[in-house]
Structure formats: structure tokens, C-alpha cells
Image (cartoon, rainbow, N blue to C red):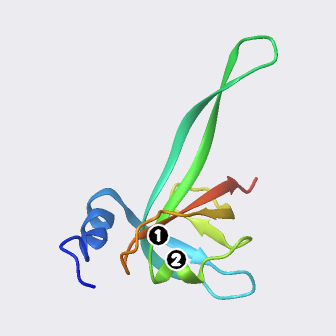
């Protein structure tokens, strides 16, 4: 089924995203256009205070996202490299929908 929204993910990725390098476990590096974010998140502490944690994520369009797996690495060009922890379902049936992946910084 064709929708008016099909193809819009590419536009969003080019406006809000950039090129990053994805390296699958045991594979060779590939450049992808994706949306990388390292959003601050406030977490409560046991003593009633808060700490600010940065939870990095990347949104990659299907079908590229279908090949990304836990343990792969992402280098968004910020001088850091991140490990893919897991994917978060988007709920969109579009063939080019974003898939969000949680990342962790590799020290």
C-alpha cells in the first residue's frame, strides 16, 4: 500500500541528520545517513536528587536499519564511537521508516 508519507523519512534524515559510519561486528565500515542524538535525561537518585545522564540514540532508515544488530558500532563524527545495545520499534509500517537504536559510548 502506498501512502503520502512514504519517502518522507529520507527528507527528515537529510534535514535533521548527517552521515555516520556503521561497522557491523566482523564486517567492514559503511557510511549511512541517519539522525544521531545524545539527549540529556534526568534520573532520580536514592536520596531524592537527580543526575543528568546522556542516553545516545541513532535513528536509521529501513532497509539500512534491518542490517544493524546488537554489538555493531556507530561513529557519528563527534569523535566518539558507540556500541549498539538494542533497537526500539517505531510502529510505522512504512518501508523507509526510522528504526531507533539505543547506544552506549565505548570508552
Viewer-proximal residue among 89 and 19:
89
- Indicate left or right for 14 with 100 as reference: left
Residue 101 x, y percent position in the rendering:
58, 62
Viewer-proximal residue among 79 and 43:
43
Q: Quick check: 24 above or below 88? A: below
**Furthest residue to the bottom?**
27
Residue 47 x, y percent position in the rendering:
80, 11
Viewer-proximal residue among 88 and 23:
88
**Furthest residue to the top?**
48
Q: Which residue is mark 2?
A: 65
The residue carrying pointer 2 sits among few (fewer than 14), some (14 to 19) or many (20 or more) residues within 10 Å by Cα, namely: some
Q: Mark 2–mark 1 contact, CB under 8 Å?
A: yes
Count of numbered tags: 2
Q: Quick check: 5 above or below 44? A: below
Quadrant of the snapshot with the N terminus: bottom left
Callout 1: SS: strand
Task: Please name the residue shown 18% across and 73% down the image.
Answer: 4
**Furthest residue to the right?**
46
Q: Which residue is mark 1?
A: 60
Query: If you read the primary sequence from the N terminus, does the residue marked by circle 2 or circle 1 appear first?
Result: 1
Residue 107: mark: none
The image quarter in which residue 7 lies: bottom left
**Furthest residue to the left?**
4
The residue carrying pointer 1 sits among few (fewer than 14), some (14 to 19) or many (20 or more) residues within 10 Å by Cα, namely: many
Amino acid at each position: 500500500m502506498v501512502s503520502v508519507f512514504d519517502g518522507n523519512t529520507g527528507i527528515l534524515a537529510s534535514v535533521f541528520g548527517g552521515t555516520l559510519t556503521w561497522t557491523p561486528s566482523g564486517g567492514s565500515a559503511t557510511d549511512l545517513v541517519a539522525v544521531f542524538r545524545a539527549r540529556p535525561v534526568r534520573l532520580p537518585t536514592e536520596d531524592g536528587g537527580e543526575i543528568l545522564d546522556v542516553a545516545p540514540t541513532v535513528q536509521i532508515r529501513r532497509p539500512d536499519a534491518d542490517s544493524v544488530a546488537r554489538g555493531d558500532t556507530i561513529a557519528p563524527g563527534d569523535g566518539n564511537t558507540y556500541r549498539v545495545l538494542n533497537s526500539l520499534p517505531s510502529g510505522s509500517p512504512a518501508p523507509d521508516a526510522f528504526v531507533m537504536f539505543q547506544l552506549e559510548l565505548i570508552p
